[in-house]
Image: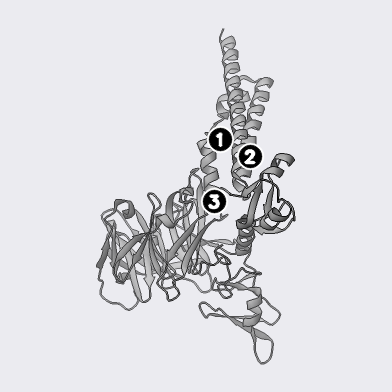
Amino acid sequence: MYKFRLLRKTAAEKVVVMKLTELDVPAGIRQTVCFTILNGWLYYRISGEETLRKYNLSTGEEKEIHIEGFKRDRFFLSSVHGQIHVFYFNNSDSPGYAAKLEFETSKAEVAKVTREESFGCSSVLPLSQSVLLVGERIFCLENYQFYDDIVHLEDDGRKKTSKPLRLLNDADVRCALAFLCSDIVYYLSTKNVRLVKLNLEDCTMEDVTDNVEDITDVQRIYGAAEIGDAIYLMGEDICNKKTFWKLQINSTGDSESTNGICCGVYLSSFDVPKILPCGHSICESYERELSVENKKKEKKSIFCPFCRRTVVLETDETLPINYSLKSLLEKSTSQDSFVCFTCGEQQRKDNCFYCETCTHTDKKTVLVCGSCACKKHRNHEFEEAKFPSRAAKKKAIVAADTLKIETDEERISPEEIISKRTHEKFETLKTSVESMELKFKSVIEDPNITPIDLENAISELKELDTKARSELKSIEEWKETVLAAIRS
């Protein structure tokens, strides 16, 4: 997971902390590069389809949206001024078009295109993730230039103007997405995953890639969209797996909130996260403080402390739990803590020590807290425990050249020779490969694994790797012997 530590220009000069979390989303979302987010819903399209889909980031609900009279299988999406916009062109020589999507009030799954406007040739078609609203001004990344006042998205009917603001000369940054988060504009290079910050006041740029921890976990970014103080990214990890991440930002650097999922009101960890219709989340305790009953005490209203929108509920009704955020909170807690071997208490990982003496005696890894290390392990050999990151574990295992065996079922299937022995040999190989996959997954998912554990796991994977290759070679040799006998 990543932490971006970027300085913001505030009176308190607080540190901005970013943390990346992999999300479990439907397979269709991981295959798309065209998506945007509005009011807690992720809108996306699958390549080649004319329909839109939307996915609730909190509840996991998914719906299909039909766009009336819009027959195009290639278009881009963006959320500007609280509305969904589509960008498209008919062919390579035609002008590009921008249009709004208006949803039927009675049928939320039906939309129609309104107010289509041309904005020039397709070579300057705005990237869907590069249309930004900053205050009352709209900025757009077009043809490697950052433009100010792209008026075709405005409602006041002003004449179209395009004022070049900044030209991206750096080849690595040219292949980039732009997005706004916590009042800061960022460029995210999709080519080699660089992060660049843009100051709109003086048009200066700052490369903040060095502030990113575990950047090697991401190999390529295909799409991005922002909502509030979170950025959603779609790309590939170093194992070429299509992955969807959430990048959460906090405007404080204290330990209570560096996990990226603290309550925005109390600036501490959520007790039970509750979600408002606007998409913002608050603590359950703060929900009780915000509730205001009407005079008849049959209704109560709750206003969002972030966007000031109000929701009206029955007096005995409560806001729904944000299960997605609750799951992230539980996962973060397990990743940032460990259970002390001696006292059995949950402790923070920055207070963790590796007892070499007990590990050697008990033949297993013994992790203890600082207090137990001083009191119960006083005469033992111990050192501060280190926990390899998810990216480091993946890199070490991939470097060991494991899990690269490809079993070609077509080539060694039982139908080829119709033999019980072929079945048995194939099942043995299959078992070896499955054992490798399970071991690989357990190593990657274990947040408390130490460098020694990782080294032992890699040795075990190497043994499984050798065994699997031996089985594969045995099958190939036996198959050739049988085929030679058949031919003769």
Mark 2 vs mark 1, CA separation in Å: 10 Å
Taking the image as shown, residue 125 lies to the left or right of residue 475, namely left
Q: Residue at x 37, y 49 (%)?
A: 191
What mark, if any, has residue 403 been given in the picture?
A: 1
Label 1: how many Cα within 10 Å (few below 14, some 14–19, many 20+)? some
Quickly name the residue at label 2: 439
Give me the disc on residue 27. 3
> Residue 123, percent across and down?
27, 56
Real-space CA distance between mark 3 and mark 2, rounded to the nearest whole angstrom: 24 Å
Task: Work out whether residue 24 or residue 187 is closer to the camera in this orientation and state it.
Answer: 187
Q: Earlier in the sequence, mark 3 or mark 1?
A: 3
Q: Nearer the viewer, mark 3 or mark 1?
A: 1
Mark 1: amino acid: Leu
- The answer to which image quadrant residue 122 occupies is bottom left
Left or right of residue 99: residue 276: right
Crowd rating for badge 3 (residues with CA inside 10 Å; few <14, some 14–19, many 20+): few
Q: Is residue 488 above or below residue 238?
A: above
Q: In terms of secondary structure, where does tag 2 sit?
A: helix
Res 171 label? none
Camera-side mark, 3 or 2: 2
Judging depth in this view, the residue of 234 and 50 nearest the camera is: 234
Q: Position of residue 409 (x, y in %)?
A: 58, 29
Mark 2 surroundings within 10 Å by alpha-carbon count, few (fewer than 14), some (14 through 19), many (20 or more): some
- SS at circle 1: loop
Do we see residue 446 in this rendering?
no
Q: Amino acid at mark 2?
A: Lys
Single out the residue that lies furthest toward the top. Answer: 488
